[in-house]
Amino acid sequence: MSTVIFRGASGRLHKFTVLRPGARFPQAAAVYAFARPVAGAGAWAPVFLSRTANLQARMARHEQWDAAMRLGATHVLVHQREERDVREFVEADLLATLKPVLNAPVLDAEPVVEEVEFGRPRLVWAA
C-alpha cells in the first residue's frame, strides 16, 4: 500500500493511503479523494474530495465516481479520522489548497426570484 501526503492551507500535512476503487474499504470514518496520477511526477491530483462517517457504505455507489473517472481518476485516497470535527478541518484545509475540479461551485446556475416577507423579491440561485 502506498501513501501520499498533502499540505493544507494551514500548513499541516495530511497523509492518505492510496487504494484501488475496487478495494474493500473499511467501515470507518474518513476524508477521501478520487485522484488521478500526475504523469512522471509520482504524485496524485485529486479531482474530488469529501468526508464520510462510513467509508465502506459511501464507496458502495458513489455518485461522483463516473465523473471522476472521466477526468482521469484511477484511485481513491483515504485519510481515516474518527473525530468529526477533525474530518471537517482536514476537508476544508485541503479543499482550500487542492481545489479539486468536481468540488468547484456550479457556475451555470440560473438566478431565481422568490418573494419573501413584505412582498420584497429576493434573489436566490438554483442549480
Image: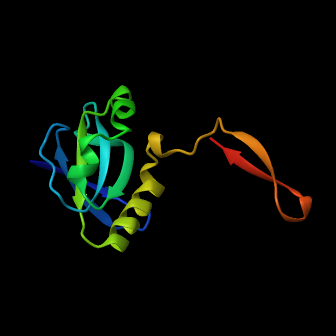
Residue 60 falls in image quadrant: top left
Q: Residue furthest right?
A: 119
Q: Name the residue rendered at 16%, 49% in the picture.
A: 25
Q: Residue furthest top?
A: 70
Residue 71 falls in image quadrant: top left
Horizontal placement of 23 versus 100: left or right?
Answer: left
Q: Return the residue nearer the eye: 126 or 65.
A: 126
Q: Which residue lies furthest to the left in this view?
A: 1
Please tell me whether residue 113 is drawn above or below residue 53 in the rendered image: above
Q: Return the residue nearer the eye: 3 or 52.
A: 52
On the image, the x and y values in percent for residue 21 come to 20, 38
On the image, the x and y values in percent for residue 64 come to 38, 38
Q: Return the residue nearer the eye: 68 or 24.
A: 24
Q: Return the residue nearer the eye: 86 or 110.
A: 110
Please tell me whether residue 64 is drawn above or below residue 10 in the rendered image: above
Query: Is residue 40 visible from the viewing direction of this image?
Result: yes
**Label tally:** 0
On the image, the x and y values in percent for residue 11 come to 38, 66
- Which image quadrant: the C terminus? top right
Horizontal placement of 2 versus 109: left or right?
Answer: left
Please tell me whether residue 61 is drawn above or below residue 70 in the rendered image: below
Query: Is residue 4 visible from the viewing direction of this image?
Result: no
| Colouring scheme applied when the structure was drawn | rainbow
On the image, the x and y values in percent for residue 48 come to 39, 44
Q: Name the residue rendered at 46%, 48% in the picture.
A: 99
Q: Name the residue rendered at 37%, 49% in the picture.
A: 49
